[in-house]
Amino acid sequence: MTTEKLSISLSPELASVLRLVARQRKDDLSRLIEVLLRESPLVQSSIRRLREPQLGSPLKKGRTMDKLRVLGRTVDALWEQRLASGKVRQVGRDA
Amino acid sequence: MAATREGESLKAALERQAPSRALSDRKLLLLGLINERLGGRERAVLVGGSLVEFYTVGQYQSGDIDLVGPRARIAKLLTDAGFKEEARYLYRDDLGLVVEVPDSHLRPTETVVKFEFEGLPVYMVSLEDAIVDRLLAAKYWRSATDREQAILLLTGHLKRIDRAVLRKKAAANEVDDLLGELMTLVEAGPAKGRPAQP
């Protein structure tokens, strides 16, 4: 089996994520990239957001903090209502 | 390959219960029915935009359902239940349900919380993880939408958030700086006399 030397350039954002992962694994960056290219659930998890389609209707850009506070109060009230109705309830949590 | 009994029962349950419900409830119903059939050892965990939809009780709406779990098994269940598969997505147009299983593993810092929806098991990553996920996208993909969603999760659940856990998860994912900035905004009162800036 031959080993190819792989030369890639990373976006600053991806480089930053990979440095974080290398630090968490106590690994050096180039070895980490080799491992990750062979498929890693951690890197797949980190780029999950990149794959997430924006199909829904996101909050409009530029909403002020005041609007987000008001919406937050609505979220709080609706959450309490939902729990009070019994339709949804929290029953456990992993350690 | 022949449909499994589990897939067929999922199909029957969906077709009986889903049409009369609002889309948000339909998504939770599907998640619960999938988990009921996976059994306890394997789980389909809600992540992504649909998780934000859950925690904001529909104030933010996502188009699809993002799950982390055993992809092959979930895909088999759904195709046996009448879902079609195209690219990464599994969908049933008639029910307005689109599912993606982008990962089979959660991030090491993510914690799973078990809820019940009308008695069915539905698994989510925690509220603190949902916030950190949005902060990651806001910081690394410079997403204004994710920044706003992080703020909405904070303003909506400020009294429920475990702040120590949130700070720890944010630090582990190197978004503690952004968290600090947004917490300052959230905890400041509304501006008097002029509109507050995001």
Image (spheres, coloured by chain):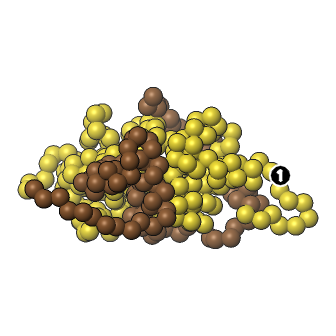
Chain colours: A brown, B yellow
* Label 1 CA crowd tier, 10 Å (few <14, some 14–19, many 20+): few
Q: Nearer the viewer, residue A60 or B93?
A: A60
- Whether residue A23 can be seen here: yes
Q: Is residue B197 left or right of residue B194?
A: left
Q: Residue at point 64% right, 71% down? A: A61
Tell which subunit mark 1 falls on: B
Q: Is residue B35 above or below residue B84?
A: above
Q: Which residue is mark 1?
A: B189
Q: Residue at point 49% right, 62% down? A: A13
Q: Residue at point 28% right, 34% down? A: B41
Q: Is residue B84 left or right of residue B60?
A: left
Residue A89: % across, % down: 51, 36
Q: Quadrant of the N terminus of chain B?
A: bottom left
- Whether residue B27 can be seen here: no
Residue at the limit of the structure toward the right, as seen here: B193
Q: Secondary structure at mark 1?
A: loop
Picture quadrant where residue B158 is located:
top right
Q: Quadrant of the C terminus of chain B?
A: bottom right
